[in-house]
Amino acid sequence: MIKIGTALFEACEELEREKGISKEVIIASLCDAMVTAYKKHLKQKEVPNVEAILDEQSGEIGVFRTKLVVENVQDPNLEISLEDAKEIDEEVELEDEVKIEVTPENFGRIAAQSAKQVITQRIREAERKLVLDEFMEKKGTLTTGIIQRVENRNVIVNIGKTDAIMPQKEQIPGEYYKPGTRIRVFVLNVKETARLPQVIVSHAHAEIVRELFELEVPEIEDGIVEIKSISREAGYRTKIAVTSNDPDVDSVGACIGPRGSRIQTIIGELKNEKIDIVRYSDNPVEYIVNALSPARIISVDILADDEYSKEAFVIVPDDQLSLAIGRDGQNVRLAHKLTGWKIDIKSQSQADKMEYAPQPHKNEEISEAEENDEDIVDEIAEEIKEQEEYGLDEEDTANIESEDQMTEEETIE
C-alpha cells in the first residue's frame, strides 16, 4: 500500500466547494490512474481482475487483483489455491474470490505521474459535464450575467461557471454594453466543445419579453392570462397579444398593472423599449385591427384565409396611413409577425382610386352576435376616438385610465 495522507482528501473537499466536483469523482479518478500505471508497469494493455482500492481511514492506496479460490490452480493470474487463500483470509472457502495486493515496490513515483495526468483530465471532463448539464437545463430561459468585455463585436457575458457569447446579431442595436454591468439575457443555445461548452445568449430575443411578463404578471404564471404571440424589433418596439381565460380578468389591464407598475418595470428592464399590449381574438378582423393599434381602421377585407396564405386588405383614414404603417414600415411589419397575416394597407383616398377596390369584409360570427350594433371595426375605432377625447395622442404608448380597467388600444412606451 502507498501512503497518501490527508492532503488528497483536503484537496478533494476544496475542489468540491469551488467547482462542484464531488470527492467521489476525484477518488475514482485516482484509482483509475493507479490501474493504468500498473498496466504500464507490467507493459500489458489488458490486465483482468485488477482494481485500485483507497482506504480513507488510513490514507493508503494499493493495487489489488481478484482471484478465484480453487483446488488445482490452472492460471496463476486468475486463480489461487485454498491453502494460499487461507493465509489471506482464514474463513475463505472454495469458489470464493479474494483480493490480493499486487502493488509493485517503488511504485509511488510512477503512480503519481500517471495520477496527475488522469486526475487533471477527469477534473476537466467533470467540470465540462457540470457546465453542460447546468446550461442545458437553462436553455430557453432567462438568466442574469455580468458583462466581461467586448471582443470582435461579440459581448462576453459571465453567467456563473462559464462565459457566454452574445453575437452581434443578438445585441440590441445602439446599446452600449459596459464591462461590469449586470445584464439579463436569454440562453439561446448550448454547444458542446472539446473544452468548456459554448453558451450562446441573446439580449434581443422575443422570448425575453415573454419571460419578463411571466415574472412580473402573476396572472400569466397562474395561467389565467395567456400570451398568444409576440413580435419584437429589439431596441425599438414590441407587440404582445394576450387573452384571458377568466371573463372577470382583463388580460391587458393585468399586464399593465396598477397605475402601470408592472409594465413600467418591464420597460425599464428593456431600456425604455416601446411595448404595445393588444387583445388577442379568434376573429381575424378584430385581431388585425387590434394589432395595428394605435392607428384607427376603417375596414378590413379578408382576401385569403387557408393553409397556403393569409392575406388581408386594410383601409385607414388618410391621416392615419403613416401611423398604421409606422416608421420604415415597423408597425405593419410587427402586426404581420404578431398575427401571421400578410397585411396590405391603403388610405381611404388610395382605395377610392383603385379600379377594383376590395369590399370591406365583416366576419359572419361577429355580425350575428352584434347584429343590432356597429361592426367590430367601428367599435374599436370608436374606442380610440374616445381615448383622444381624453387628451391621448396617437403617438403615446402609455395610457392608464385607472387601476382596474384598460383597453387593448392602450400602448406603453
Image (spheres, helix red, strand yellow):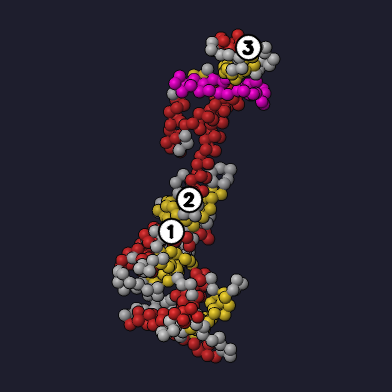
Q: How far apart are marks 1 and 3 (CA)?
A: 70 Å
Residue bearing mark 1: 211
Q: Distance between the residues labelled 2 and 1?
A: 13 Å
What residue is drawn where x is 47% and y is 82%?
A: 367
N-term mark: 2 or 3: 3
Using a 10 Å C-alpha cutoff, classify the residue at mark 2 as few (fewer than 14 neighbours), some (14 to 19) or many (20 or more): some
**Amino acid residing under circle 3:** Ser
Which is nearer the eye, 148 or 57? Answer: 57
Question: What is the span of residues highlighted in magenta in the rendered image?
Answer: 38-64
What residue is drawn where x is 31% and y is 73%?
A: 401
Q: Could you tell me residue 27's position as x and y percent? A: 50, 28
Say above or below: 162 vs 288: above
Residue bearing mark 3: 81
Q: How far apart are marks 2 and 3 (CA)?
A: 57 Å
Indicate which disc residue 155 carries: none
**Amino acid residing under circle 2:** Lys
Q: Could you tell me residue 11's position as x and y percent? A: 45, 30
Q: Disc 1 vs disc 3: which is toward the camera?
A: 3
